Image: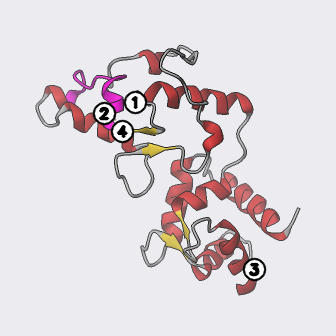
Amino acid sequence: MNAVDTTVEKLRAQCLSRGASGIQDLARFFRRLDGNRSRSLDARELQRGLAELGLALDMAEAEGVCKHWDRDGSGTVDLDEFLRALRPPMSQAREAVIAAAFAKLDQSGDGVVTVDDLQGAYSGRAHPKVQSGEWAEEEVLRHFLDNFDSSEKDGQVGAHGVPHLLPPPRGPTESMPVPRSRWLSSRTITAV
């Protein structure tokens, strides 16, 4: 295990010990570290944040971690890169469920889930804000989609560089078996 991997494991353990067990908790931690609110962390912010957790790195080490996590070459670590670095590896069973859920939601089959795709799988008519007239049904679906979208909230959720989570391409007559579960088969979103 190299120094960066050791740092990631220590940081993951620290986050878990402080109650950051899911993506939303890690995203909150990221926002706390992002001192200048740029939606990305530079090596100095990363160094300061890790020091708060008791992981003291010198600037060269912090720059090394930042460079290792920086997938887009921007020189900083954005939220997606941060989450990718810290989340533990998924089991094959979990990957299969995610791929099946993604395939179910991706009605167009283009590898990106949009509100239009969700309209084929869900209905927001029973949502209290739709029934009260405060929101249109499309807004309910957009808020639902935003739960899975990146920090930019562009209304599109894709595999984000994790193509192994997507099912193999299907022909027009082929179909992928999808496990049945209440949330996948439901046609109504009642809470956002």
Q: Earlier in the sequence, mark 3 or mark 4?
A: 3
Q: Nearer the viewer, mark 3 or mark 4?
A: 4
What is the three-letter code of the residue carrying label 2?
Answer: Asp
**Which numbered disc covers residue 61?**
3
Q: Local crowd at mark 2 within 10 Å, few (<14), some, or many (≥20)?
A: some
Residue 134 locus on image (x, y percent):
13, 37
User: Given the current orientation, which residue lies at the most extreme left position?
Assistant: 133
The image quadrant of residue 80 is bottom right
Residue 24 locus on image (x, y percent):
51, 49
Q: Earlier in the sequence, mark 1 or mark 3?
A: 3
Whether residue 120 is visible, yes or no, is: yes
Q: Earlier in the sequence, mark 1 or mark 2?
A: 1
Distance from the alpha carbon under mark 2 to that under mark 3: 45 Å
What is the three-letter code of the residue carrying label 4?
Answer: Thr
Distance from the alpha carbon under mark 4 to that under mark 2: 5 Å
Q: Nearer the viewer, mark 1 or mark 3?
A: 1
Q: Nearer the viewer, residue 62 or 103?
A: 103
Distance from the alpha carbon under mark 1 to that under mark 3: 44 Å
What is the three-letter code of the residue carrying label 1?
Answer: Ser
Q: Does the CB distance between marks 1 and 2 fall below 8 Å?
A: yes
The residue that mark 2 highlights is 116
Distance from the alpha carbon under mark 4 to that under mark 1: 9 Å
The residue that mark 1 highlights is 108
- Residue 172, compared with residue 136, is above or below; it is above
**Which numbered disc covers residue 7?**
none
Q: Does the CB distance between marks 4 and 1 fall below 8 Å?
A: yes
If the image is split into quadrants, where does the C terminus sit?
A: top left
Q: Does the CB distance between marks 2 and 3 fall below 8 Å?
A: no
Residue 161 locus on image (x, y percent):
58, 51
Q: Local crowd at mark 3 within 10 Å, few (<14), some, or many (≥20)?
A: some
What are the residue bounds of the magenta stretch?
A: 115-128
